[in-house]
């Protein structure tokens, strides 16, 4: 198992490395045909996927400093892509949510991601793609539970 765990870790580092590269983000933004600073792209996507979300949780999910994320959220807010409001579960917490304009932008990014993924998986069988997605979702769920300290 330890060889597999090492291989899994190496693969995840490779995936994270590619997904964290500014040039890859810039390419995705260009492919989507939108005008968005590459540094703001991952944040907007996370707000759309996980929001409404607090700044601290957003910073933790993105592996960034709270103050940096707060400044970047302010930039997204000034562009009308996100808004801050009271969190649904705790009125003391300010949460960030995507606006209709931000949603339109993430929809364009999703369409670009779909086109790029279709090209990348062109020589994969549907079954292989389905298996990959299923196992990654299962792994991500287990990882999230483990990070929260929950038992399986």
Image (cartoon, helix red, strand yellow):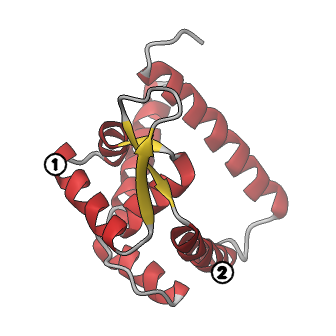
> Residue, x 50% and y 29% (percent of image)?
143
Q: CA distance from mark 1 to mark 2?
A: 34 Å
Q: Is residue 82 visible?
A: yes
24 or 5, nearer to the observer? 24
**Of label 1 and label 2, which has the lower sequence position?**
1
Question: Could you say where residue 5 lies in the image, as x and y percent from the top left?
Answer: 45, 31
Q: Is residue 19 visible?
A: no
Question: Could you say where residue 16 lies in the image, as x and y percent from the top left?
Answer: 38, 54
Residue 115 tag number: 2
Within 10 Å of disc 1 (Cα), the crowding (few <14, some 14-19, many 20+) is few
Question: Could you say where residue 115 lies in the image, as x and y percent from the top left?
Answer: 66, 80
45 or 119, nearer to the observer? 45
> Residue, x 43% and y 62% (percent of image)?
82
Picture quarter containing residue 25?
A: bottom left
Is residue 104 left or right of 15 when viewed as pictured?
right
Residue to which mark 1 is pinned: 67
- In the depicted structure, whether residue 139 falls above or below residue 142: below
Badge nearest the viewer, 1 or 2: 1
State which quarter of the image contains the C terminus. top right
């Amino acid at each position: 198992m330890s060889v597999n765990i090492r291989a899994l870790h190496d693969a995840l580092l490779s995936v994270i490395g590619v997904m964290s590269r500014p040039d890859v983000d810039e390419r995705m933004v260009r492919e989507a045909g939108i005008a968005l600073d590459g540094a703001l792209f991952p944040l907007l996507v996370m707000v759309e996927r996980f929001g409404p979300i607090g700044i601290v949780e957003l910073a933790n999910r993105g592996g960034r400093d709270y103050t940096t994320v707060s400044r970047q959220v302010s930039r997204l807010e000034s562009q009308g892509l996100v808004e801050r409001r009271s969190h649904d579960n705790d009125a003391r917490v300010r949460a960030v949510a995507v606006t209709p304009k931000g949603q339109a932008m993430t929809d364009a990014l999703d369409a670009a991601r779909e086109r790029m993924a279709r090209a990348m998986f062109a020589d994969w069988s549907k079954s292989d793609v389905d298996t990959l997605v299923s196992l990654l979702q299962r792994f991500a769920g287990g990882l999230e539970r483990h990070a929260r300290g929950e038992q399986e």
